[in-house]
């Protein structure tokens, strides 16, 4: 696991860098907990319907702290992208192949992906 930093991210990254400190605890408080539970349920359903295996390569756009990665099959190779360095730093422990700090409107990838997650 490694973390790459890309320069030139949006000014909103500052806000999300601040939010990164309270994001996980905040998701446990209602009404955010209800939204997180619904998000988890929908992602689980989608992951079960998709044919993902260890040969699949995917990208999680706006990965935040890595909640979506925990739902995807562990065999799948998934890259995380977030414009907040602090969010990406916390996502680095979620099981991504790599986490890149970048704006999703200007991705630093030349590769093609089998699937994309963007929640």
Image (cartoon, grey):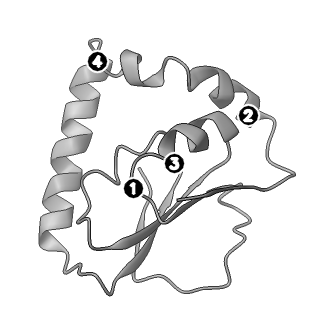
Q: Nearer the viewer, mark 1 or mark 4?
A: 1
**Mark 4: which secondary structure?**
loop
C-alpha gap between disc 3 and disc 4: 21 Å
Query: Residue 22 location in percent, x, y?
Result: 50, 17
Q: Which residue is mark 1?
A: 95
Mark 2 packing: few (<14 Cα in 10 Å), some, or many (20+)? few
C-alpha gap between disc 2 and disc 4: 24 Å
C-beta proximity under 8 Å, tags 2 and 4? no
Q: Nearer the viewer, residue 75 or 30?
A: 75
Q: Nearer the viewer, mark 2 or mark 3?
A: 3
Mark 4 packing: few (<14 Cα in 10 Å), some, or many (20+)? some
C-alpha gap between disc 1 and disc 2: 25 Å
C-alpha gap between disc 2 and disc 3: 20 Å
Residue at horizontal 26%, vertical 41%?
Answer: 39
Query: Residue 106 location in percent, x, y?
Result: 74, 65
Location of residue 38 by image quarter? top left
C-beta proximity under 8 Å, tags 3 and 1? no
Can you tell which mark lies on residue 12? 2
């Amino acid at each position: 696991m490694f973390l790459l930093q890309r320069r030139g991210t949006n000014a909103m990254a500052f806000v999300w860098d601040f939010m990164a400190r309270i994001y996980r605890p905040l998701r446990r408080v209602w009404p955010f907990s209800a939204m997180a539970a619904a998000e988890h349920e929908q992602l689980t359903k989608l992951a079960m319907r998709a044919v993902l295996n260890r040969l699949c390569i995917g990208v999680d756009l706006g990965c935040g702290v890595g909640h979506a990665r925990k739902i995807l099959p562990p065999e799948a190779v998934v890259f995380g992208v977030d414009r907040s360095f602090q969010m990406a730093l916390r996502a680095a422990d979620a099981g991504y192949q790599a986490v890149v700090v970048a704006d999703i409107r200007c991705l630093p990838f030349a590769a093609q992906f089998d699937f994309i997650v963007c929640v």
